[in-house]
Image (cartoon, rainbow, N blue to C red):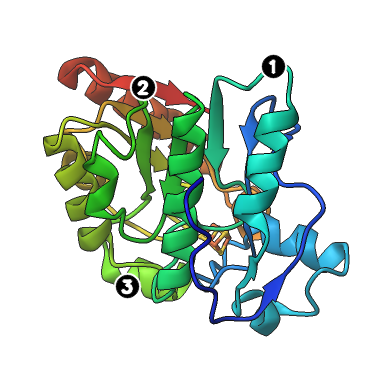
């Protein structure tokens, strides 16, 4: 079993870890909160506040590790009669949170443990994917390593994703894993309407032209978008651009 990384930040204990999400796939969220503090707003933050798991945005931005995550996962995998084929990290936090090496170490330990049971992993981050993920001896399964990216403009990141890594760093990290022969993904959601942020979609797409998969979808949970005139038409145009781009570059494209 991979060692539980030394935990120096505040931690919580949970009774279970691996679960099947309402979206139909298995997930692990081994951190409560996320220092990236996205302001779209972040749906995970809204839910955590609604259920009383965090008081406010400031508390959300101070992540707490699930201290018993590796032990729990090991026990759950040994007890399960049928193992999932794939597990996603994460739906309600970020597995490679900027400035939190303890989160990174725990995420790597979890991926290693899952791969040891031949369960592949899909990863999504607004941080920097570690180069270690290219190591086939430690991570032998056909994992998918994804970045969340809706803009390459630093002004956008500072306004909407203040704690996340700059787009250039995310792209460089996922490119390194692509060059290391791993499957990669660009998750383009929530894509901003022109009323939220004016930008060139072609430029964003060109920055990730090397990935295997692109997922593109709109901007939810913000009345500013639902009330914006022309937002629907702008998405329809953007969706066409994404589909054509993916077809031209041999990328598996999905428009949500
Ligand atoms: S990176 Fe994801 S989990 Fe973290 S604040 Fe942003 S949207 Fe929420």
Which residue lies under the disc numbered 3? Answer: 155
N-terminal of the two: label 1 or label 2? 1
Q: Is residue 121 visible?
A: no
- Other residues around mark 2 within 10 Å, as few (<14) / some (14–19) / many (≥20): some
Label 1 beta carbon less than 8 Å to ligand 1: no
Which residue lies under the disc numbered 1? Answer: 82
Instruction: Identify the element where label 1 is drawn.
Output: loop
The answer to whether residue 39 is above or below residue 229 is below
Q: Is residue 2 visible?
A: yes
Q: Quadrant of ligand 1?
A: bottom right
The answer to whether residue 202 is above or below residue 38 is above
- Other residues around mark 3 within 10 Å, as few (<14) / some (14–19) / many (≥20): few
Instruction: Identify the element where label 3 is drawn.
Output: helix
- Other residues around mark 1 within 10 Å, as few (<14) / some (14–19) / many (≥20): few
N-terminal of the two: label 3 or label 2? 3
Q: Quadrant of residue 213?
A: top left
Q: Quadrant of residue 210?
A: top left
Question: Mark 1 to mark 2: distance in Å?
Answer: 30 Å
Question: Is there CB contact under 8 Å for labels 1 and 3?
Answer: no
Question: Is there CB contact under 8 Å for labels 3 and 2?
Answer: no
N-terminal of the two: label 1 or label 3? 1
Which residue lies under the disc numbered 2? Answer: 253
Instruction: Identify the element where label 2 is drawn.
Output: strand
Query: For the residues carrying marks 1 and 3, which lies nearer the camera in this image?
Result: 1
């Amino acid at each position: 079993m991979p060692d539980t990384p030394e935990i120096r930040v505040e931690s919580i204990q949970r009774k279970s870890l691996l679960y099947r999400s309402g979206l139909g796939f298995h997930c692990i969220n081994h951190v409560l909160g996320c220092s990236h503090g996205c302001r779209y707003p972040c749906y995970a933050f809204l839910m955590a506040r609604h259920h009383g798991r965090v008081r406010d945005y400031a508390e959300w931005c101070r992540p707490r590790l699930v201290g018993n995550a590796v032990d729990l996962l090991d026990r759950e995998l040994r007890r399960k009669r049928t193992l999932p084929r794939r597990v996603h990290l994460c739906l309600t936090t970020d597995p490679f949170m900027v400035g939190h090496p303890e989160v990174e170490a725990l995420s790597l330990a979890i991926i290693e443990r899952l791969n040891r049971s031949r369960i592949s992993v899909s990863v999504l981050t607004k941080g920097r994917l570690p180069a270690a993920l290219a190591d086939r001896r430690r991570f032998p399964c056909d994992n998918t390593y994804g970045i969340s990216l809706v803009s390459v403009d630093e002004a956008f990141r500072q306004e909407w994703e203040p704690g996340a890594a700059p787009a250039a760093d995310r792209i460089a990290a996922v490119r390194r894993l692509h060059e290391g022969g791993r499957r990669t993904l660009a998750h383009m959601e929530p894509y901003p309407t022109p009323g939220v942020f004016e930008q060139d979609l072609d430029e964003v797409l060109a920055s990730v032209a090397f990935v295997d998969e692109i997922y593109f979808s709109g901007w939810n949970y913000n009345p500013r978008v639902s009330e914006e005139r022309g937002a629907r038409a702008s998405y329809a145009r953007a969706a066409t651009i994404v589909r054509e781009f993916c077809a031209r570059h041999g990328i598996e494209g999905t428009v949500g």
